[in-house]
Image (cartoon, grey):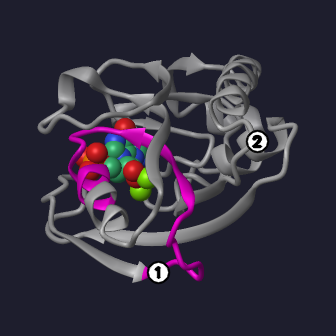
Amino acid sequence: MRASDIEADLTEVLCTEDEIHAKLGELARRIEADYEGRDLLLVGVLKGAIMVMADLARELERHVQTDWMAVSSYGAGTVSSGVVRILKDLDSDLSGRHVLIVEDIIDSGLTLSWLLSNLRTRGAASVEICALFRKPEALKVHVDVKYVGFDIPNKFVVGYGLDFAEKYRNLRDVGVLAPHVYS
Ligand code: 5GP
Ligand code: MG
Ligand code: MG
């Protein structure tokens, strides 16, 4: 299957690879300024954030450390319940560290809200969030996201790490999945 065949499953492309890279560059400049003179630990949330983490980390022209967590919401597949289970915990001790959570997308906000309070109990000096996408109309809880790439409509999107049934993560752009694919 060629990349163009994957694109054929989309009704629209919301962000191209180039637009995403440009945005990550802007966010990286802000992060460099905000964390100047301080060590920084990037915490990626598996698996959706793999591409954001890889590209944001390389946009940063400074040292960073990286670590990963995998979490899963209890309950039915597509709806986040807010009850979160840790599938893979961090390898790092957060005491005194400046932590930046790197996420693909904030939808209801329930997962990040839980993650933020969980990491804040571990003695970090600061914990902030960077999310490439946010769906303002889908938010159920307020979450302070310091760095947001794009606000997008309340539609199910895939690509650039975001999956449907573990597929589409390798699509370079981000787009809206056509209904015929999941019905
Ligand atoms: P939340 O707890 O904010 O509702 O959901 C967080 C997680 O659900 C995201 O990190 C992401 O993995 C998944 N998710 C939310 N919206 C979408 C979407 O539009 N497309 C995909 N592929 N995953 C999504
Ligand atoms: Mg995610
Ligand atoms: Mg998923």
Specify start and end residues of the magenta stretch as a single range: 88-115
Q: Residues within 10 Å of mark 1 (few under 14, many from 20)?
A: few
> Mark 2: which amino acid?
Asp
Residue behind mark 2? 55
On whether residue 109 falls in the magenta region, the answer is: yes
Please state the total of marks drawn on the protein image. Answer: 2
User: What residue is rendered at 42% in x and 40% in y?
Assistant: 105
CA neighbours of label 2 inside 10 A, class few (<14), some (14 to 19), many (20+): some
Considering depth in this image, is 52 or 60 the residue closer to the camera? 60
> Front-most of 30 and 5?
30
Going by the numbered disc 1, the residue's amino acid type is: Asp
Q: Which mark is residue 133?
A: none
Looking at the picture, how far across and down is residue 160, in whole percent?
63, 41
Q: Is residue 15 above or below residue 113?
A: above
> Could you tell me residue 70's position as x and y percent?
46, 72
The image quarter containing residue 36 is top right
**Residue ID at (53%, 18%):** 14
Residue 45 is left or right of residue 180, and the answer is right
Q: Secondary structure at mark 1?
A: loop
Label 2 residue SS: helix
Residue 33: horizontal and vertical position, in percent?
Answer: 70, 26
Residue placed most toward the observer, 92 or 87 = 92
Give whichever of discs 2 and 1 has the lower sequence position: 2
> Looking at the image, is 59 positioned above or below residue 126?
above
Q: Is residue 131 magenta?
A: no
* Contact check, label 2 and label 1, Cβ < 8 Å: no
Q: What residue would you read off at disc 1?
A: 89
